[in-house]
Image (tube, rainbow, N blue to C red):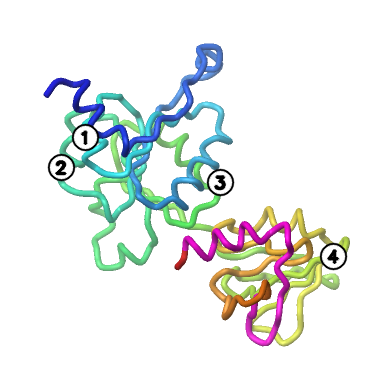
Amino acid sequence: MNITAVQNSVNHKVTRAKPVSLTDAYKEELIHVEIVSTDAGNIKMLQAYLSKLGHIAVLNIHKSVKSFLCTLTECAVLFVDVNMMNEDLLNETKLRSPKLKIIGMSSRQRFEKNNQDELPFYFLRLPAISEELIPIINLLKICSSVLPVFYETKKYLLVKSEYKIIKINFDDILFIAGMKDYVRIHLKTRSMTVTTLQNLKDFEKKLPPIEFIRVHKSYIVAAQHIDCIAKNVITIANHSIPVGEAFRGKMHKFISENS
């Protein structure tokens, strides 16, 4: 089978990114990236974050390791779901280029039983935030050898409330209610809410996008604490949070992706 036939045989599994103009390429040296993943949510998140970095070009998105092995494009960085990583993939990347960097994507829990010092790739904990990708990409540009590097997702936020600075753990947030120029944070560890001078739109930007969902112009909920969704009302603990009409499509997508 010739190369064209091989490519055609896996085209249904490969998503090709838009071509990058030569003008953009000359502004800064482009880093070519490919992604191997079957998780639509992770792919979308990664694409969104990488698109914010002007010197990154995503060449292909593969739904299988075989698809990646059949392509002849040369990338500098390969993002791979850890549960898809195998010996064939590792051997092939070594043959293609000793400078090719592999970034394994998964939760920290997957590595608890392994010796992390011996991992032959970088590691990006999911869910990730965009700020974590900037240092990891910069590191990949200057490193000459692959060493295990770990980036932890930020787990808390410091907010000003009543002349105090309070540490809020993301895991403790049940939901956030907006009230014009203030937000009220409902926590599972406090009987009283924490109120801070900030509008809901600005506060939303500081939250991990995978863990929190805007469901109403006045409400953001923590996905992990949702107990029930019925008739466009979300139940969390003893609280009922309405789902706004403009946000129902996002809520239906969340339900579909987690069903």
To which quarter of the image does residue 167 belong?
Answer: bottom right
Q: What residue type is disc 1 on? A: Leu
Tag 1–tag 3 contact (CB < 8 Å):
no
Q: Earlier in the sequence, mark 3 or mark 4?
A: 3
Between discs 3 and 2, the one toward the N terminus:
2
Q: Secondary structure at mark 4?
A: strand
Q: Mark 2, mark 1: which one is toward the viewer? A: 1
**Residue at left 24%, top 60%?**
115
- Which residues lie in the magenta part? 234-257
Tell which circle, 2 or 1, labels the residue nearer the N-terminal end: 1
Disc 1 crowd, CA 10 A, few/some/many (<14, 14-19, 20+):
some
Residue position marked by numbered label 2 in the rendering = 88
Q: Counting other residues with Cα less than 10 Å from the Cα at mark 2, is it few (<14), some (14-19), or many (20 or more)?
A: few
The residue labelled by disc 1 is 69
Question: Disc 3 vs disc 4: Cβ atoms closer than 8 Å?
Answer: no
Answer left or right for 109 relative to 203: left
Q: CA distance from mark 1 to mark 4?
A: 52 Å
Q: CA distance from mark 3 to mark 4?
A: 25 Å
| Amino acid tagged 4 | Tyr
Whether residue 27 appears in magenta in the rendering, the answer is: no
Q: Nearer the viewer, mark 1 or mark 3?
A: 1
- Which residue has dot 3 on it? 130
User: First in sequence: mark 1 or mark 4?
Assistant: 1
Q: Nearer the viewer, residue 166 or 110?
A: 110
Residue ID at (22%, 21%): 4
CA separation in Å, label 2 and label 1? 9 Å
Circle 4 sits on which residue? Answer: 182
Residue 110 point in image, percent of width and height: 31, 64
